[in-house]
Image (cartoon, rainbow, N blue to C red):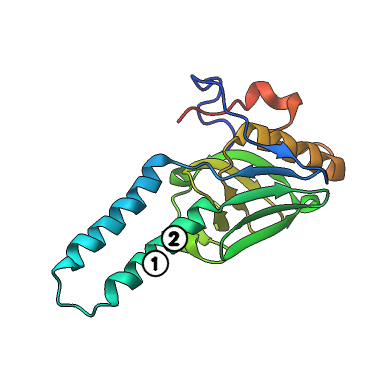
């Protein structure tokens, strides 16, 4: 689950650079949004409407279910990542985590499938707390199965910025200003030849 799955094999298309730095020097990127996932939420809403159209259930039931789907969609679409001078912020509607840059020890590419987490519903919790047989307890604030695993001293954080390579470079640059080079760091230009973005 290091930065080398698919190492040496570049993605067939150039990554779309979605990150930007604001006037306060903070680097922003959003979660990678999949039209298929958004479509799945829309289909769920339609299914609820069809099922309950002729149902004898209480009239408020479909509205509650639809509201729940809209809540989950809002959380999905609101996923954002920000790096400032001291912290990595990963947040979404009704949840988030702040990680001090000085605590970061590893930055690597990872897939949530490779982590084989237990408790997938944990990804909808406040911190998205999960457990993996490979790395133990970790937090997850993500919108896509492929992303970055950032390991601090305690609980690692899995996130999926729209531009993982660009985000890793910016995070690495700021982390190295605190602690110097990291042993595992896919964003360090000095290690780029061994940590190209895997193609999934």
Q: Is residue 129 above or below residue 64?
A: above
Labelled pair 2, 1 in contact (Cβ < 8 Å): yes
Q: Is residue 166 above or below residue 98?
A: above
Q: Position of residue 144 (x, y in %)?
A: 48, 44
Quadrant containing the C terminus in the rendered view: top left
Q: Position of residue 42 (x, y in %)?
A: 33, 52
* Image side of residue 40 versus residue 26, left or right: left
Question: How crowded is the residue under tag 2: few (<14 C-alpha within 10 Å), some, or many (20+)?
Answer: some
Query: Mark 1 = which residue?
Result: 68
Query: Mark 2 = which residue?
Result: 72
Q: Is residue 105 above or below residue 184?
A: below
Q: Which mark is residue 144?
A: none
| Residue found 35% across the figure and 46% down from its top | 39
Q: Quadrant of residue 117?
A: bottom left
Q: Is residue 185 visible?
A: no
Question: How crowded is the residue under tag 1: few (<14 C-alpha within 10 Å), some, or many (20+)?
Answer: few
Mark pair 2, 1: CA separation: 6 Å
| Residue found 82% across the figure and 52% down from its top | 86
Residue occupying the far bottom of the picture: 58
Q: Quadrant of residue 16?
A: top right
Q: Secondary structure at mark 2?
A: helix
| Residue found 74% across the figure and 31% down from its top | 188
Q: Position of residue 183 (x, y in %)?
A: 73, 37
* Image side of residue 143 versus residue 179, left or right: left
- Name the residue nearer the viewer: 126 or 197: 126
Q: Secondary structure at mark 1?
A: helix
- Name the residue nearer the viewer: 102 or 30: 30
Q: Position of residue 81 (x, y in %)?
A: 65, 48
Q: Quadrant of residue 140?
A: bottom right
| Residue found 44% across the figure and 56% down from its top | 73
Q: Is residue 90 visible?
A: yes
């Amino acid at each position: 689950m290091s930065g080398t799955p698919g190492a040496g094999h570049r993605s067939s298309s150039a990554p779309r650079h979605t990150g930007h730095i604001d006037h306060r020097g903070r680097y922003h990127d959003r979660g990678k949004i999949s039209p298929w996932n958004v479509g799945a939420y829309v289909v769920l809403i339609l299914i609820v409407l069809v099922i309950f159209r002729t149902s004898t259930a209480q009239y408020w039931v479909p509205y509650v279910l639809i509201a729940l789907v809209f809540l989950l969609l809002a959380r999905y679409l609101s996923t954002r990542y920000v790096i400032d001078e001291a912290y990595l912020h990963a947040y979404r509607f009704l949840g988030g985590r702040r990680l001090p840059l000085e605590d970061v020890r590893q930055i690597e590419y990872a897939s949530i499938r490779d982590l084989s987490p237990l408790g997938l519903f944990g990804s909808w919790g406040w911190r998205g707390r999960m457990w993996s047989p490979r790395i133990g307890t970790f937090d997850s604030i993500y919108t896509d199965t492929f992303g970055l695993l950032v390991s601090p001293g305690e609980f690692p954080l899995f996130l999926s910025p729209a531009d993982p390579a660009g985000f890793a470079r910016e995070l690495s640059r700021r982390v190295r200003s605190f602690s110097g080079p990291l042993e595992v760091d896919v964003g360090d230009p000095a290690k780029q030849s061994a940590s190209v973005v895997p193609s999934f």
